[in-house]
Image (tube, grey):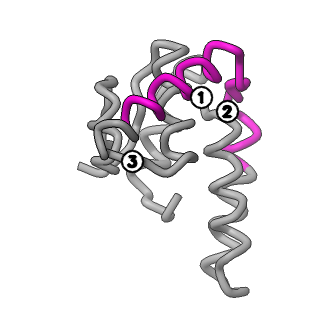
Amino acid sequence: MRGEPHVATRVAGTPREDVAVCQVTAAEIEFGLRDLPASRRRRSLEAQWSAIGRELIRLPWSDDVSRRFGERKARLEKAGRRMSDFDLAIGVHALAYDLTLVTADRVFERLKLRRDNWLD
């Protein structure tokens, strides 16, 4: 969440039931906000997250997510293609719930999932 206005517009223009975040993503956003120095930008981003975040569906960490996490992590490590645990957890949520992951981060190519980049 970097305050990209066109991303906020895209979220606002997407049906509510079609946008969700996993708790891992929410945790990363919460950390990112608190890691910023006190500033007008931080307050603006906190207000945006507060407004958007409370409207989003939160995907739970299910047994299927745990199984997929273990399988994918083992496979990636054996292939020498490590990912951070948080990125892997976010990706396997998308796989478990059969969703498209909206991200500009190319690391998710390792998981062979549907991706869309709203920054383009």
Instruction: Measure how far apart labels 3 and 1 are at the Cα level.
Output: 25 Å
Specify the quadrant of the image occupied by residue 72: top left
Residue 9 position within the rendered picture, expressed as x and y whole percent measured from the top left: 45, 45
* Residues shaded magenta: 51-76
Rendered view: 58 above or below 118: above
**Residue occupying the point 42% across, 39% down:** 10
Residue 35 position within the rendered picture, expressed as x and y whole percent measured from the top left: 68, 76
Q: In terms of secondary structure, where does tag 1 sit?
A: strand
Question: Which residue was labeled with disc 1?
Answer: 20
Question: Which residue was labeled with disc 2?
Answer: 56
Residue 78: mark: none
Q: Main secondary structure of the magenta part?
A: helix
Whether 84 is among the magenta residues is no
Earlier sequence position, callout 2 versus callout 3: 2
Whether 74 is among the magenta residues is yes
Type of amino acid under label 2: Leu
Residue 8 position within the rendered picture, expressed as x and y whole percent measured from the top left: 49, 48
Residue 82: mark: 3
- Judge by depth and name the residue closer to the eye, 12 or 75: 75
**Residue occupying the point 71% across, 29% down:** 58
Earlier sequence position, callout 2 versus callout 1: 1
Q: In terms of secondary structure, where does tag 2 sit?
A: loop
Q: Residues within 10 Å of mark 1 (few under 14, many from 20)?
A: some
Residue 93 position within the rendered picture, expressed as x and y whole percent measured from the top left: 55, 26
Q: Residues within 10 Å of mark 2 (few under 14, many from 20)?
A: some
Asked whether disc 3 touches disc 1, contact meaning CB atoms under 8 Å apart, the reply is no
Type of amino acid under label 1: Ala
Type of amino acid under label 3: Arg
Q: In terms of secondary structure, where does tag 3 sit?
A: loop
Specify the quadrant of the image occupied by residue 81: top left
Instruction: Measure how far apart labels 2 and 3 are at the Cα level.
Output: 29 Å
